[in-house]
C-alpha cells in the first residue's frame, strides 16, 4: 500500500531530482521514493547510534530501532568510535551464568 505525500522542495533539489530522473530513466516519483527511503534508513541508524552512545538503549535495541543486523550496528558503532557499553554482568547474563 502506498500513501501519497506532497512536499515543497527548493528549486535546486527539484533540479537534482529531475537530473536523476533523466539519468536513470525513471519517473520523478520513483527517484523521490528511492532517495527518501535511503534518507529515512540513515536517519534511523543515526538516531539509534545517538541513543546507544548516550546509553539510553542497548546495542540490540539500537539495531532493532535501525532495522539492521546486530553485527552491522556493532560495526557502525565501532566506526563512529562509540564505546561498547557491555559489562561483565551483561556477559554472564547473555551466557546464562
Image: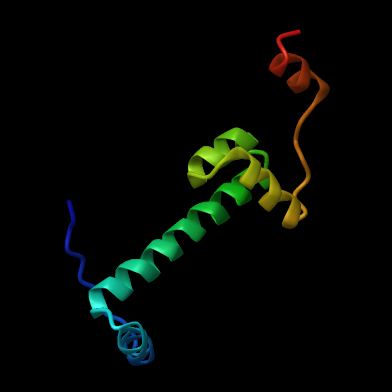
Image position, residue 85 (x, y; %): 75, 36
In which quarter of the view is residue 87 placed? top right
Indicate the colouring scheme: rainbow
**How many numbered dots are placed on residues in this image?**
0
Q: Judge by depth and name the residue closer to the eye, 6 or 23.
A: 23
Q: Residue at x 32, y 75 (%)?
A: 31
Q: Residue furthest top?
A: 97
| View extreme (front): residue | 25
Relative to 34, say whether 66 is above or below.
above
Residue 30 image point, x, y percent: 27, 72
Answer above or below: position of 29 versus 89: below
The residue at 76%/8% (across/down) is 97
Where's residue 45, x and y in %?
A: 54, 53
Front residue of this view, candidates 76 and 88: 76
Question: Please, which residue is most extreme toward the right here?
Answer: 88
x and y percentages locating residue 58 in the rendered image:
63, 34
- Using residue 67 as the reference point, say whether residue 20 is left or right of it: left
Nearer to me, 85 or 26:
26
Give the residue displayed 36% in from the left and 68% down from the top: 34
Q: Does residue 19 appear to the left or right of 74 in the view shown?
A: left
Residue in the image at 18% along x and 56% along y: 2
Amino acid at each position: 500500500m502506498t500513501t501519497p505525500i506532497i512536499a515543497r522542495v527548493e528549486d535546486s533539489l527539484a533540479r537534482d531530482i529531475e537530473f536523476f530522473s533523466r539519468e536513470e530513466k525513471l519517473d520523478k516519483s520513483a527517484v523521490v521514493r528511492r532517495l527518501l527511503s535511503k534518507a529515512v534508513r540513515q536517519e534511523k541508524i543515526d538516531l539509534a547510534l545517538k541513543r546507544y552512545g548516550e546509553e539510553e538503549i542497548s546495542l540490540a535495541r539500537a539495531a532493532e530501532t535501525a532495522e539492521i543486523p546486530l553485527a552491522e550496528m556493532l560495526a557502525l558503532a565501532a566506526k563512529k568510535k562509540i564505546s561498547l557499553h557491555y559489562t561483565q554482568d551483561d556477559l554472564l547474563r547473555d551466557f546464562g551464568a
